[in-house]
Amino acid sequence: MMKPSLPIAILSVALGAAIAHASVWDRALTSPEDEAAKDLYDAKMLEGDTATLTATIQSASIANTQESIKRAEAAYRAAAAIRPHEAEPYFRIGHLLYQMYFACERPIVQLPTCELPYASATQQAHVVEAWDEFENRAPLDPRVGEILLKRALLNTKLVNGSANDHRRLEAAARDYEAALNRSDGLVGIRGDDSLLGNLAETYMMLGRLEDAITTYLQAVSVGAARIPTMYGLAVALDRDGEGDQATRRILEQGITGFDEFQKELALGLVFYVPRGEEYYYFALSNEAFGNHATALESWKLYVASGAHPEYQPRAREHIEQLLKKHVYAEPLPELDDRTWRRHTR
């Protein structure tokens, strides 16, 4: 029986990056108090690593797994309190919580902790906060590059219509920009638009339509634009007052593209923030294909959701235009919660 990859991934961080003991000469230069603090710090880090290993044992019950996760996090936080300038405890906290709650697309193993209510918004926030503290203390650590896209997505998923949304979106944009700067121009060569597409959409959610359109077009120019990205470009163009161009972009993808977009949304391969944003996409695409009754209902649902107030006037313009054509709305089926958010995973 093959062993799952998750324990190996965590052990590579928890055990492979074990803290080296100071040399005899180093200890001679430190006070007994500092030496005692270092020993206690090392003991807490080892306690956290041991609990992390226990949490990865697949035969454990969900209750035991969660208890091990809590013990590991508590031990790492205790180590951080002993030596506040150390970055390592915070990296391990973030890595542990991310692997246990949010690295849920592994083909070999699917941890029960990936399911709600275990993988909660609170856990997402804890991962982001831990990795922020890690980067603040060790900005040049190469592992910062490994967490950028993960942290950006977690910040985006935390957008819920609250006062913190702008701060989280700004943080996500910074991480996407930093990842783009580290890519050395390789974005698009692998046909992966998750970076450029997500950055463009983050700009749009921040109200930076010009930057969003420019970034979407960059994804197109390097051949990295998938159907959801093309639909994102259409939405940005429409919100920028370029309705004809928006319609053209959607129609260029054809009915096959329309079906693919809806399929990816239904499967949770793309997501929207905040709740209700997806209706703008439904409305615009259905209107482009002449499904006016469905489009009108989607526009109304978008307005009712209150998502992105800055784009509500444009949605109302669409409603007025459809009403002038004597279009009547038809009720739409209730959407699954997985479809509320947009960002390529």
Image (spheres, rainbow, N blue to C red):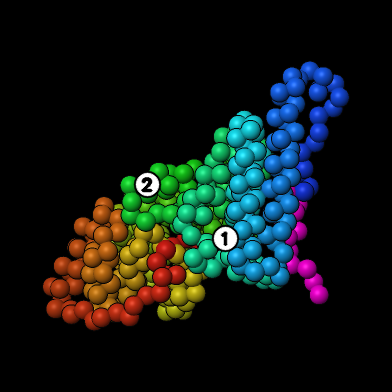
Across and down, in percent, residue 24 comes to 86, 24
Give the spatial CA distance, label 2 vs label 1: 21 Å
Across and down, in percent, residue 269 comes to 51, 69
Report the disc number at residue 164.
Answer: 2
Q: State the residue at coordinates (18%, 79%).
A: 327
On screen, residue 172 versus residue 78, left or right, reads left
**Does residue 60 belong to the magenta stretch?**
no
Q: Given the image, on which type of amino acid does mark 2 rest?
A: Asn
> Is there any visible trace of residue 245 in the rendered image?
no
Stretch of the chain drawn in magenta: 1-14
Q: Quadrant of residue 161?
A: bottom left
Across and down, in percent, residue 83 comes to 64, 31
Reading the image, the residue beneath label 1 is: 102
Main secondary-structure element of the magenta-colored stretch: helix
Q: Say which of 7 and 193 sits in front.
A: 7
Instruction: Tell which circle, 2 or 1, labels the residue nearer the N-terminal end.
Output: 1
Q: Given the image, on which type of amino acid does mark 1 rest?
A: Phe
Across and down, in percent, residue 109 comes to 68, 70
Q: Quadrant of residue 98?
A: bottom right
Farthest residue toward the right? 24
**Does residue 11 belong to the magenta stretch?**
yes
**Within 10 Å of the Cα at label 2, are there few (<14), some (14-19), or many (20+) other Cα atoms?**
few
Q: Say which of 5 and 18 sits in front.
A: 18
